[in-house]
Image (cartoon, grey):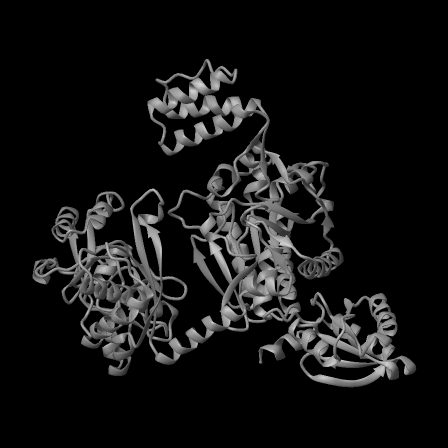
Amino acid sequence: MMSQSSSGPAASDAAPLPSVTVRLPDGVTQTHPGHTTSMDIATGISEGLARAVVAADVNGKVIDADRPLGEIAAELGAGGNDADKPSDGELDLRLLTNRDQEALDVLRHSAAHVMARAVMRLYDGVSLAFGPTTEGGFYYDFDLDVPVREEDFPKIEAEMKKIIKEKEPFERFVLDRDEARKLCDDLDQDLKVEHIDTGLSEHSTVSFYRQGEFVDLCRGPHIPDAGKIKAIKLMSVAGSHWKGDVKNRPLQRLYGTAFFDKKELKQYLHQLEEAKRRDHRVLGKQHGLFAINPDEVGQGLCLWLPKGARVRVTLEDFLRKELLQRGYDPVYSPHIGRVELYETSGHFPYYRDSQFAPLFGTEVGGLLDAWSNRLEDGSLDKDGEDKLMAAVEALGVELPEYKLSMKVDDKRRVLHDWQLANERYLLKPMNCPHHCHIFKAQARSYRQLPLRLFEFGTVYRHEQTGELNGMLRVRGLTQDDAHIFCTSDQVEEEFRATIELTKFVLQSVGLDDYRVQLSLRDPDSSKYVGSEEQWDAAEGALRGVLEQSGMNFNEEPGEAAFYGPKADFMVRDCIGRSWQLGTVQLDYNLPERFKLEYNGTDNQPHRPVMIHRAPFGSLERFTGMLIEHFAGAFPMWLSPEQVRVLPLSDKSLEYAVAVAKQLDEAGLKVTVDSTGGKVQAKIRNAQLDLVNYMAVVGPKEAETGQIALRDRIDGDLGSMPTAEAIARLTEEVKQRTVRQAVKADA
């Protein structure tokens, strides 16, 4: 928003801030007046550090480097009693420089403001929405009459560079809601006015940031000045809607990225180009791995073609063998279940928006389900209610208890009671409720625990169309799901074993670069189920195991599943991208919901603890990720075509088939190229098809019982007896080496 005269309250009007005690990362504590900023402390350490500081982390909250620490202490509830007395609570202060990821996020948020300012300079009548950061950069949503196109990027970037060159500071000020609303209204920023009226209705004051003539409603934080931005680039433009709701005003979303260093930007752009080359959707089609036909089969429903299915079967067989050796029992469960099953588990209605609609035996069932949803979201007016009631009555169903004068909750209860009396089924969104009933199907003793159940179970999620992405985001997915039922005393050992299993699986496919994200609950959120004591116990157990293991992990409050904390493996692929793959989740909640019991040593019933784990996550996502990681060139043990036999001519075809039979009997995935043409062309085709080895055979090889073996990477390995080649190749499969995939990338 443009502003010429707006200003925040004068510093002299503010009450004196209480002093604060600050603890630095090295353990040193300092007491400072409340008006002291993080930048002041950095300056006190060294001028060089002050120049490098971008922002600060205070008790886990990232703030502007020039915010008074007394003000932050008051916000965090750690303020002192008066200006002359140190704070009872200490502030943990960490100064953020360009080496910290949090600092890059602050830089990019500031870059979004710079971009918005440039757009407002270049276009008339711009209405601003929001400009958050993303994993790889930032975006800003605009409402303007003129469409922005990629050919406009150079002039916008040029204007952004002018702004950056001026090195103007980002200045924060606070207004009460009425003043803030008037300011936004005066500046013709109707979207901001609406946000103050609705999204910020519970806030008595709101914050703004000014940079030169540009003012934006924003909670921050920001870099000290725009000069910190050393590299910036606009990436793309797309359509969006106000607050992400398609019913709201359409907007234009402009994406960009920013870095502290031009080399980092260059490296990032190279990574994007490499990612395009490795796009699993392109490689999947090119090499016949999978297909998705949205028009006839359905969006997000993956068809595994023979080659892709071979990769999947190999992964399943590998993990199945490992699980059986580790004491797991296989189970199977149906693809649908009664809605009540998922109501008990909490998946319905917690994840209602991401599930397919319930299946009913009668037309009225679907009608009542839609009726219930409209009551819940408030979209049903009296006229619509009358029409629904008439439609239901026309289908021969009476709801005598339903009255138009009833409260909404009572109306929903009547509809729900009817639904309970009639069978409703749901496409299975999760396997865990079924496994709970498998546990419950028989009497259990403590002597049988831990009970480890596993299933390659297909589940269904109604993901939004715009979120679907090849195999990485689908609507039908098969999880390598397992649930461990154990006693409280067994939790840590079982959790440790699942962590070790996940590490083993990732290392087997050459994924050694990973960290663990410990996802915890947000204490201020009401979406979680279970007692506080259960959550504390669960989080403490997971944290303890990760600390003892010495693994690299970080904690993320608010990222837990609704039923318990989890440890997610965040894996970096060979071009540096991060993927969330294996997961382990601890659950005290579902055993309580399903009233699961085992007979304890005291001959009394006890609740088991439940551990959810899936090293792959889903076979679709895991395979899609491997396609991109290996650029389609799977290591020998995973390859869908390990050896291709190439006869020199039709005269050698019979021997080629015989060799292929020997390779096949040894367990190798082999094909024969029986096409005509020169062997050089056959070799080239095999190379392009990413076949690991080629066995060239001619009259000489047929006479001596040998093959001329070629490695896709190393080339000609010479002639050798077929038995020797088989021993060599089967040993490589047995060792699960990723040698070729790594070489291919190099």
* Residue 59 in sight: no
- Which residue occupies the foreground of this view, 346 or 275? 275
Q: Image quadrant of residue 38?
A: bottom left
Residue, x 22% and y 71% (percent of image)?
159
> Horizontal and vertical percent for residue 100?
37, 72
- Which residue occupies the foreground of this view, 249 or 658? 658
The reply, left or right, for residue 216 in relation to residue 301 is left
Which image quarter holds the N terminus?
Answer: bottom left
Residue, x 50% and y 61% (percent of image)?
517
The reply, left or right, for residue 170 in relation to residue 312 is left
Q: Image quadrant of residue 315?
A: bottom right
> Horizontal and vertical percent for residue 290?
62, 58
Which image quarter holds the C terminus?
Answer: bottom right
- Which residue occupies the foreground of this view, 358 or 431? 358
The reply, left or right, for residue 602 in relation to residue 646 is left
The reply, left or right, for residue 627 in relation to residue 646 is left
* Residue 312 in sight: yes
Q: Is residue 684 above or below residue 476?
A: below
Residue, x 43% and y 43% (percent of image)?
527
Q: Image quadrant of residue 408?
A: top left
> Horizontal and vertical percent for residue 242?
30, 48
Q: Residue furthest top?
A: 400
> Horizontal and vertical percent for residue 213?
14, 64
Q: Residue furthest front?
A: 676
Q: Residue furthest right?
A: 703
Q: Is residue 491 above or below residue 46?
A: above
